[in-house]
Amino acid sequence: MRAVVLREFGAADVLRPDQVPDPEPGPGWVTVRLKASALNWHDVLVRRGQYGSPLPHVPGADGAGIRTDTGEEVVIVPSLWWGDDESSPAPGWEILGDHRPGTYAELVRVPVECVAPRPAGYSWEEAAALPLVGLTTYRALFARGGLRAGESLLVLGAGGGVATTAVAFGCGVGASVVVTSSSTGKIEQARALGAAGGVLYTEADWGPRAKELSPGGKGFDVVLDSVGTWAEALRALRPGGRLVVLGASAAEQAPLDVRRFYFGQYSLLGTTMGSPQDFAGLLALLDGHSIAPPVIDRAFPLEDAAAAHRYLEQGGGFGKVVLRHD
């Protein structure tokens, strides 16, 4: 089958089209003929060697296509072997495309519990873009953050897949959503998705300035931080608010004023991609609310995965980057 193969770690050009053996069938597993796959920043880290993937390797966590055994149209759930404890993953948990062949290929083999129906009305590209960011954002906002209708949400770093999904989910359930960005253009794009407004995080004191945009200027109920700027994010929270952290793209260490933290009665919640039960909750959310599909920024042919990675890394897009497999 056609695939994009990683034979060494490094820059985007190490991703090259090649022919690899079809996946072997086996009990408890299904094979999906992929129509599209989607990029995540996680894929960039895999390509750079951060997750110690075996070489040669086919990366990719997200995809959508047709089950070869039943003909069903499905999306791939990239959370493998979460375990029985919903509070955190089991020791054997892994993300598809880390240590097992992923979705940058014509075919992918996954455990049978890791496929779900393609959402009605979604294109193949939108379906491929949903699983990782949808599952991650659902767990962050609802399973961990407890976001409810009528509450307020600040999303840091508008433009990426998680951020655009968080805006759509928050607005879809009736929350008031504000964003931060390095670009006034991205703030306007977030407003088009339903956000009430935004501030530039490139300017000093963006936390208090964002707080001014919260209902009544009292601060946000939830701040979703995928960048690692906890100290400033806390300045945008209301007393008793929840800071939900799922990334460290800007900083891997975060100094905090301990006294201010406990006097503020804040909650600090870490989260990752979720469980199959979270994915079922995600599908129920989509069925029960009017929520726009994932925003597709740009699509590339499968063979141009290296170009897609370069585009993702330059950071100028808004929404998801996907690969077409036809």
Image (spheres, helix red, strand yellow):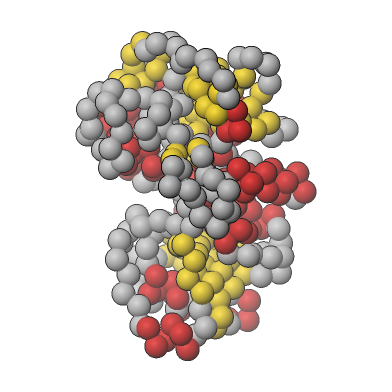
Depth order, front residue of 151/270 = 270
Q: How many marks?
A: 0
At x 39% / y 74%, what residue is drawn?
Answer: 232
Q: In front: 325, or 206?
A: 325
Front-most of residues 110 and 40: 110
**Residue 229 x/y as whole percent:** 37, 67
**Residue 252: percent from the left, percent from the top?**
30, 61
Relative to residue 175, is residue 121 depicted above or below?
Answer: above
Query: Which residue does the image show at 75% across and 50% down from the upper left?
Result: 289
Res. 5 in view: yes
Answer with the quarter of the image where residue 213 lies.
bottom right
Which of the 4 image quarters holds residue 14? top left
* Vertical arrangement, residue 305 with respect to residue 191, above or below: above
Give percent across and percent down for residue 187. 50, 57
Let me know if residue 189 appears in the view: no
Report whether 273 appears left or right of 41.
Answer: right
- Tell me the residue at 63%/53% (across/down): 169
| 291 up-or-down from 199: above or below | above
On the image, the x and y values in percent for residue 166 come to 57, 54
x 62%, y 48%: residue: 278
In the picture, the quarter occupied by the N terminus is: top left
